[in-house]
Image: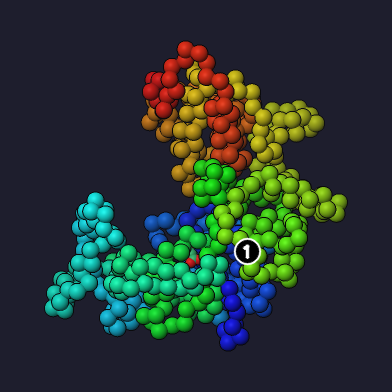
Amino acid sequence: MTVTSSRPVRVRIAPSPTGDPHIGTAYIALFNYVFAKKHGGKFIVRIEDTDQTRFRKDSESMILDCLKWVGLPWDEGPDVGGPYAPYRQSERTQLYREYSDVLLNKGHAYRCFCTSERLDTVRKERMSQKLQGGYDRHCRDLPWPEIEKQVKNGIPFTVRMKMPLSGNTTFNDGLRGPVSFENDGVDDQVLLKSDGFPTYHLANVVDDHEMQISHVIRGEEWISSTPKHVVLYDMFGWQRPEFTHLPLLRNADKSKISKRKQPTSINYYRRKGILPDALRNYLALMGWSYGDDKEIFTTQDMIEHFSIERMTLGGPVFDLEKLAWINGHYMRSLPSDAYVSHLREEIFSADALSKIVPLIRERIEKFEDFIGASYFFFSGDLKYDPQLLMPKGRTPAEAAAILTDALDALEVLESWTVADITAAMEGFLAAKNLKAKDVYMPLRVATTGSKETPPLFDSMAVIGKEMVRRRIRCAATLLLSLPMPEQSPAPAKSPAGKN
Ligand code: GLU
């Protein structure tokens, strides 16, 4: 990443509000923030919410809350405004349509009238013939009268960019140097969908240009989109930003970090009692080294010492133990009053207690019993008695399958209320033809560690989705690690088979 004096440094993160705020967003945000501060630039948050099918209502406020908590204040964004407002793409759709027209008028884009059925067939055919790209560019050179006729008849169309048919597209990556793609392997990307909404590619390029973004620092999953983006910059005649693609966070098995293998929600780490300073320090180590084997440093320290040369290209493994080690350091150095405030605000907050008390108050007679009756609301991973996790007559593998299938049914929930959880679990029981006791007891033990607890779904709602998910996974992993009982039937893939 180089900085030219002619262009003020302006960087951004552009999260899509499609789910729980992801730890990867905090990681990319940290590097953008540090880069901006290092160079006296601006750090911007833009919400990319044009994909209506993936959009989730509360996600934007959750993302902003989480980033605030992480401690990476932005200079411009949907909540604070700024000179290039609005910072929410759904409020900028007119602009994308105008720029799509610019490309059509310049002959750099075309209307594609292909139906989704045709596109499906073509994609499959091309795949079976091992051809590059999924679209055959059928509409790229339609004669003008044909186009006029289709438009007049109200045939819906998308707008596609005309990728060059030969040669290479090359851009310079801040970490990798020149990166080249053969153009005939890059599809004629759809820029505007038939509903008039832009795709990510058009909106992203238009906004980065309009918002004067000087450096695009994002995850490496976007590298293959970048040739499309640089061609768009060239078509519009705009100055390209400098691109840097950061290595993705990985699971221990080196696959891309995923919530199936470990918690990815920022809220999980907050709920777990990770301090924001520790999280930033840890995320910094994922992509950069301070030098001198120094592992504990503040974000301010990082800003002062930051340089691209000490960024790493390897796939950094997100290691919970290392994070805990760093957190321990920050926790121990907290002054006592800050320590107590943290406990009051994050662990024993009035909000948390007011949710827990109604579930406990009928169950105890002395306040001294409160902690014992409610510890599982406050603690992290639990210790299990494996026998309690197994419904009568089931093998450990069957019990594990019940838990992971139940988790699949919970996983899809967008909101996590008692009513949502109840409906999901009742639907699951009916769909798999399972008895309540076979599911609810292991689920209760997995999520609370005990057989005697307040109502299960109320407890799950208070514990929170991320923590419930984590505990169910840990319980299933424990079950699968048990020796298989002799003469037990082969592990059932789905517990439904039993009934
Ligand atoms: N909206 C994209 C995302 O969700 C932004 C990618 C980019 O930074 O260009 O990550």
Farthest residue to the bottom: give it.
6
Answer with the quarter of the image where residue 453 lies. top right
Q: Which quarter of the image is occupied by the C terminus?
A: top left
Residue 290 shown left or right of residue 311 in the figure: right
Residue sitting at x 54%, y 47%: 254
Q: Is residue 202 shown left or right of residue 301? A: left
Q: Quadrant of residue 23?
A: bottom right
SS of the residue under disc 1? loop
Between 125 and 361, the one lying in front of the other is 125
Q: Residue 125 vs residue 17: left or right?
A: left
User: Disc 1 marks which amino acid?
Assistant: Met
The crowding category of the residue bearing disc 1, from other C-alpha atoms within 10 Å (few below 14, some 14 to 19, many at least 20), is: some
Judge left or right: residue 418 versus residue 294.
left
- Residue 440 % position (x, y): 52, 27
* Residue under numbered circle 1: 311
Q: How many marks?
A: 1
Q: In the rendered view, would you say 475 is above or below 129?
A: above
Q: Position of residue 279 (x, y in %)?
A: 68, 55
Q: Position of residue 474 (x, y in %)?
A: 59, 34
* Res. 493 in view: yes
What colour scheme has been applied to the protein in the rendered image? rainbow
Residue found at x 54% / y 52%? 20
Outermost top residue: 487
Closer to us: 36 or 163: 163
Question: In this orientation, does residue 276 appear?
Answer: no
Vertical comparison of 132 with 354: above or below: below
Q: Residue at x 22, y 72 (%)?
A: 140
Q: Quadrant of the N terminus?
A: bottom right
